Image (tube, coloured by chain):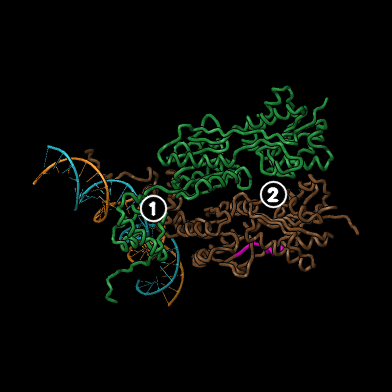
Chain colours: A brown, B green, C orange, D cyan
Amino acid sequence: MTGQEDKPARKRRGGGRPTIADVAARAGVSTITVSRALRDPHKVSETLRDRIDQAVRDLDYVPDSHASALASARTNVLGVVVPSLTNNVFSDTLRAIYDGLEGGPLRVQLGNSRYSAAEEERLLRIFLSQRPCALIVAGNDQTPAAREMLENADCPVVQIMEVSPDPVDMMVGFSHFEGGRAAGAHLIAQGYRHIGFVGARMDPRTKRRQAGFAQAMKDAGMYDPALIMTTATSSSVALGGWLLRELRQKRPDLDAVFCNNDDLALGALFECQRSGISVPDEFGISGFNDLEMMAAAFPTLTSVRTDRYGIGLRAVEMIRACLDGHPPARKILDLGFAVQARQSTARSPRD
Amino acid sequence: MTGQEDKPARKRRGGGRPTIADVAARAGVSTITVSRALRDPHKVSETLRDRIDQAVRDLDYVPDSHASALASARTNVLGVVVPSLTNNVFSDTLRAIYDGLEGGPLRVQLGNSRYSAAEEERLLRIFLSQRPCALIVAGNDQTPAAREMLENADCPVVQIMEVSPDPVDMMVGFSHFEGGRAAGAHLIAQGYRHIGFVGARMDPRTKRRQAGFAQAMKDAGMYDPALIMTTATSSSVALGGWLLRELRQKRPDLDAVFCNNDDLALGALFECQRSGISVPDEFGISGFNDLEMMAAAFPTLTSVRTDRYGIGLRAVEMIRACLDGHPPARKILDLGFAVQARQSTARSPRD
DNA sequence: CCCTGCGTTGTTAGCGCTAACATAATAAAG
DNA sequence: CTTTATTATGTTAGCGCTAACAACGCAGGG
């Protein structure tokens, strides 16, 4: 025996990291005071606060978030579930979310549902079991079980990318239907008469854009289902070329195409270049989302601009407001869209 | 007094979710047996296991990961820190990581360092305080403090995207220097003689590609610093066009360009089309990474193919192996690269 | 019959933190 | 100068889970 009275009955599990008790001992206060000094500094006198801050620095103390979560039943984790990590649409929004959280205490827990509602449900179940302080999910097409979980979640929930009349809680996005309709209307206004639709993956938002496009065609008495070319395959530039080629073989009179996203539109442009079809005079092309490359292409490509970054930023703002106790008055935020008419649909006047 | 003997001295904080004790009570066993049945099913007899599984299903029990983490000082969280979420390179790798984790118990904690080593250090400090079961970080250019944290981390660490002789622990990637050199050598071999370099953002990997390119030029006696055009601005298609225009104004004899990435290369192609310069006969273009669009462009674009998806998958495999107690023999995995020669550098024979 | 070994289950004592309540010190009010 | 409100700090008792050890039953060996 060493004569020492401390009883190391069990070796410290935490790898010897300093705990709040170490900080408290060094600062000569109780642990709860340290806890308060770190979470609500104004609740602790300046004298003690300084002593505690010094002790924290001396010991290089970092609070254990698991212990904190367990004791308080709260976390600083914002759960985010998106359908894709590679799709620019979501990576832009994600970047905005991270940017919006900059400096604050919130952390992100990111899930990738891969466009599967079942996977989304599974992820939400896991996320919710960890008591997130808020949730961001894409769209409004959850499974019934997921919808119920979200409705019963005792934290703010923001659905992003879309707007619909029946949000779970809050919503930031725009109308894909109207976006599709506007693109169709633009092509009609530019004088094109045999306008096709090219779509890939066909997730709910894609389908709404397609429906909007179809509506525009119907309104103009130009709707023809044979001009619709879609595939469940995920989108790519090459696919845009293939689908356009297929469609033109089937319908040689095709004189314009609304591509469900910009990758497809870029592929369509290359396909026209390959086939010696002049854009926009012989053939018009419009994309969707207005990625940066659309304005840099030659010819520049028409697209429907969407504010993906703004959606992420606003979602974070709304969550912040809720957590600060000032829930926003407007639960649904429609950030709209704008048809960016460029060279690819600027047909010279004819007939 | 109601006469009831239960003492609700404090209302249950957890919102009434079932705990492991509820499951244990329902299955008629002790809590530790439930804990074991869920974590190491083989340590519990089949009879009890079935009863416990039934109770779990009946109560819809989900373990509290915070309590588990606190009690065991372990988590199932894989920390991933990447410099960008929008750069295709990292989103492809990230997708692979998520795909590789599919079905398993591991979850991802994702950090975005935005190409800042200081931010990376901050994120690593946070992540490590949560006892991740493993870490994936990009590259080998950490701050000294971050490097030390990684070396002292008591979990597997995989550095991705690059290979270098002094990894913290494990490493999966390829040599950016050699990739840049190969691209330069290819342009020389195709007969181009005044070859420029266009680069953006200039992160460490970009710089290594540039250095490799410069080496190729030096080896051929063709190095000319005036043919290098770089900017700290982040990369875009439009930027590729602007940089090429600038460079051609300065050096009208330029006859090819190695673009540090594919976005820039696409912008360079559009710039040539706008200026009526024929690619590849008058001007050669090579990109880097070989994104999907490169093979779909017109003309198809030469690039250096890198296995971004494979890097993510292998990183996860290595981590899995370590956690299973079979650390891989080879700590450094070089997945290489391949110059994909396409039309944009296929110059017709001349002089 | 005891001993040893092994597999299964339970008991106890925390992990590091914070909620709730208790208390002390100080200020404001009468 | 007491009463009441207010602020600053401390005490106690967990949050839900798991590590460590204890205990039990049962096999085989001596």
Q: Label 1: state its secondary structure.
A: helix
Query: Looking at the image, which residue is at 55% across and 45% down?
Result: B96
Compared across the picture, whether A229 is left or right of D20 comes to right
Which numbered disc, 1 or 2, marks the residue closer to the eye?
Answer: 2
Q: Disc 1 is attached to a residue of which chain?
A: B
Nearer-the-camera pick, A265 or B217: A265
The percent position of residue A65, horizontal first and vertical second, equals 44, 52
Label 2 crowd (10 A; few <14 / some 14-19 / many >=20):
many
Residue position for label 2: A239
Nearer-the-camera pick, B170 or C15: B170
Q: Disc 2 is attached to a residue of which chain?
A: A
Q: Is residue B265 placed above or below B225 in the rendered structure?
A: below
Between the residue at mark 1 and the residue at mark 2, the CA separation in whole angstroms equals: 47 Å
Q: Label 2: state its secondary structure.
A: helix
Can you say which quadrant of the picture contains the N terminus of chain A?
top left
Residue B68 is marked as 1
Q: Is residue A85 placed above or below A210 in the rendered structure?
A: above
Can you say which quadrant of the picture contains the C terminus of chain A?
bottom right
- Extreme residue toward the front, this view: A250
Type of amino acid under label 1: Ser
